[in-house]
Image (cartoon, rainbow, N blue to C red):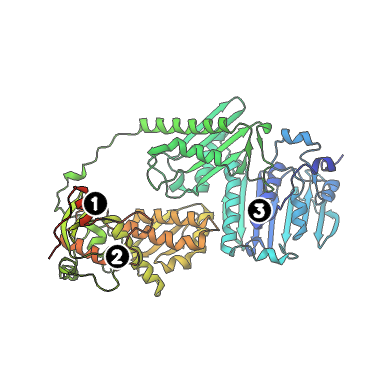
């Protein structure tokens, strides 16, 4: 009896149909899952043209006999179930019986397969609706060769991203499968060059294998120091690796959730993760998470979406509490075990003590002093600046409405807010937000007039990332170059940043910015408009003077004049208020006085 059976209309009519093949990556995901369901311990992938020209996947699974090979391309043909009730007892990835049929409908497909110890292998070919089959050489396992994807639906090709972006998605699919299946060897070649190779982990301890595979996929920077969680309760087993409080990147792109080894997108699980970190999560930091959940098949529904990416739990609240509670407990134990370090209080540093600037940049002029606050010295041209704002009796033509000279500098409040007297009232600047706005518009202007000023680094800044993230960043190398960055591939899983914008120099902040860029690349809807704004705003934020930096009178007037010349000086590029004004009438009202004597 053949393993594969055609589903009855009663069954498949109740299984929602939908688009299975959206792009090369979705095609690859279906084929990898078929290989894993067949018991493969080795999966080799080779693509050209970012998977659009050819995609070949070979495995050493159980293989198929002549009848199975003949049926595998037919619609609603599957080895995973025979009756509707089987949906609640599935222990495999797929069950729609549509994947191979859908792939063959939009490409040219050849499948060759042989069972172990078989004397004959079998092949089936589909092209333009014509299906042929016959004997083939005996190679145990199955090889699927897909050629000319979307050749008969060319409109779909127009919706694909650049080849670099599609290659990144292909790598991401393999990385997910590798994380969930540490005992399987994966190799991936693109355009004849090996991109990924994950050797099987076989220590005999699944969690140790899981840990080793996570390090191989994520890289040492992200995987180093992750906290292990391994708990079994009635009906559920949870294996997780999560970031401690002090080792989180600036991107949320390194979070992976699997249910019975199936990669899923789950708002419930992600929200539970963030609840566990709560208010202790540093601003701008995101946890790394690799979570494997093993549940009874009837405890969740994976038939929510044709791509089987989304799941619906029967007990959402229970899953939320389990994940949140386990992560919170692991974080608390790690925090309690962490060594106590005592750092000198900022106030203990003398106000006039020199603060050195990191020597990352090889040469070139430094930013103006108010960009750096106490970190740099005041350039000669800045010292000679005529303090026009202090003496001006009227606003220049085209000045914004908030600019109401004359201004008289009064000093700093908590070395964060700059206080001025302005026409009998009070005018307050948030020194960081104001400087951030000035830098943002300065850098944006440079880009719009031919590119940001860039500085070579004495030593490249290495960034260790998953291969999919590396390819995503490199795909936008030209766009990054326009804002002053130069990035090149390095090693198996990494990048070297070799140049940065002239206003940006801190090595640790370079890594944070690259993580932010990866986040913006992960959202195709907002990518085009977000990448430039987010990158420039981040550069401005990191390079600008900070709260609690000591600034002098000259720097205060310089910042005020620069803000006056901005297109929008009222807020920083992230939307936070940069200024607060209380005019003379408002001051008088607050003190219940009829008014102040006008200035002469």
In the image, taking residue 273 as reference, residue 178 lies left or right, namely right
Q: Nearer the viewer, mark 1 or mark 2?
A: 2
Residue lying farthest to the front in this orientation: 594
Residue at left 52%, top 33%?
A: 323
Q: Nearer the viewer, residue 365 or 402?
A: 402
| Among the 4 quarters of the image, the one containing residue 235 | top right
Q: Nearer the viewer, residue 568 or 277?
A: 568
Mark-to-mark CA distance, 1 and 2: 24 Å
Please rate how many residues cluster around mark 3, counting C-alpha atoms within 10 Å: few if below 14, some from 14 to 19, many from 20: some
Sequence-wise first label, 1 or 3: 3
| Among the 4 quarters of the image, the one containing residue 393 | bottom left
Locate residue 375, reporting x and y percent. 22, 57
> Do residues under tags 1 and 2 come within 8 Å of each other at their CB atoms?
no
**SS for tag 2?**
loop
**SS for tag 3?**
helix
Q: Nearer the viewer, mark 1 or mark 3?
A: 1
Locate residue 224, reporting x and y percent. 43, 43
Locate residue 439, reporting x and y percent. 32, 63
Sequence-wise first label, 1 or 2: 2
Residue at left 47%, top 60%?
A: 530
Q: Mark 2 highlights which residue?
A: 401
Quarter placement of the C terminus: bottom left
Mark-to-mark CA distance, 1 and 3: 51 Å
Label placed on residue 465: none
In the image, taking residue 31 as reference, residue 242 lies left or right, namely left
Residue lying farthest to the top in this orientation: 234
Q: Can residue 455 be seen?
A: no
Residue lying farthest to the left in this orientation: 600
> Do residues under tags 1 and 3 come within 8 Å of each other at their CB atoms?
no
Locate residue 62, reporting x and y percent. 75, 43
Label placed on residue 26: 3
Label placed on residue 416: 1
């Amino acid at each position: 009896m053949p393993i594969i059976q055609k589903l009855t209309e009663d069954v498949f009519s109740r299984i929602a149909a939908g688009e299975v093949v959206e792009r090369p990556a979705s095609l690859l995901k279906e084929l990898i899952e078929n290989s894993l369901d067949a018991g493969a311990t080795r999966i080799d992938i080779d693509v050209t043209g970012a998977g659009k020209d050819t995609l070949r996947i070979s495995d050493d699974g159980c293989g198929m006999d002549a009848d199975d090979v003949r049926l595998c391309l037919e619609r609603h043909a599957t080895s995973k179930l025979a009756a509707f009730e089987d949906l609640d007892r599935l222990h495999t990835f797929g069950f729609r019986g549509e994947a191979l049929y859908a792939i063959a409908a939009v490409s040219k497909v050849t499948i060759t397969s042989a069972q172990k110890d078989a004397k004959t292998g079998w092949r089936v070919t589909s092209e333009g609706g014509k299906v042929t089959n016959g004997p083939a050489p005996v190679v145990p396992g199955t090889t699927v060769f897909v050629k000319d994807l979307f050749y008969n639906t060319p409109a779909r090709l127009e919706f694909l991203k650049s080849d670099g972006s599609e290659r990144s998605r292909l790598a991401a699919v393999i990385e997910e499968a590798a994380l969930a299946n540490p005992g399987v060897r994966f190799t991936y070649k693109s355009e004849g060059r090996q991109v990924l190779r994950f050797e099987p982990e076989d220590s005999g301890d699944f969690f140790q294998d899981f840990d080793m595979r996570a390090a191989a996929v994520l890289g040492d920077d992200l995987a180093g120091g992750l906290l292990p969680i391994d708990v079994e309760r009635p009906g559920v087993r949870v294996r997780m690796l999560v970031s401690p409080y002090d080792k989180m990147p600036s991107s949320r792109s390194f979070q992976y959730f699997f249910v019975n080894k199936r990669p899923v997108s789950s708002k419930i699980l992600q929200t539970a993760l963030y609840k566990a970190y709560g208010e202790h999560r540093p601003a701008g930091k995101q946890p790394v998470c690799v979570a494997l959940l093993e549940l009874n098949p009837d405890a969740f529904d994976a038939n929510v979406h044709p791509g089987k990416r989304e799941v619906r739990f029967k007990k959402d609240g229970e899953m939320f509490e389990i994940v949140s509670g386990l992560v919170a407990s692991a974080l608390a134990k790690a925090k309690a075990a962490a060594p106590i370090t005592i750092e000198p209080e900022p106030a203990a540093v003398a106000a006039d003590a020199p603060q050195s600037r990191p020597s990352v940049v090889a040469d070139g002029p430094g930013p103006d002093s108010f960009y750096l606050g106490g970190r740099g010295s005041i350039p000669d041209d800045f010292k000679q600046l005529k303090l026009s704002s202090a003496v001006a009796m009227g606003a220049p033509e085209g000045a914004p409405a908030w600019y109401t000279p004359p201004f008289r500098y009064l000093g700093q409040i908590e070395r964060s807010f700059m206080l001025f007297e302005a026409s009998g009232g009070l005018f307050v600047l948030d020194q960081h937000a104001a400087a951030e706005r000035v830098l943002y518009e300065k850098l944006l202007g440079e880009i719009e007039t031919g590119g940001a000023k860039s500085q070579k680094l004495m030593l490249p800044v290495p960034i260790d990332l998953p291969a999919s993230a590396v390819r995503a960043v490199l795909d936008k190398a030209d766009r990054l170059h326009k804002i002053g960055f130069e990035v090149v591939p390095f090693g198996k899983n990494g990048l070297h940043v070799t140049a940065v914008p002239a206003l940006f120099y801190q090595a640790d902040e370079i890594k944070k910015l690259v993580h932010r860029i990866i986040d913006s690349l992960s959202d195709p809807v907002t990518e085009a408009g977000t990448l430039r704004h987010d990158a420039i705003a981040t550069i401005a934020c990191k390079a600008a003077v900070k709260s609690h930096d000591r600034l002098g009178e000259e720097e205060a007037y310089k910042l005020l004049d620069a803000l006056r010349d901005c297109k929008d000086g009222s807020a920083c590029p992230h939307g936070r208020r940069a200024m607060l004004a209380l005019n003379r009438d408002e001051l008088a009202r607050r003190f219940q006085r009829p008014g102040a004597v006008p200035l002469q």
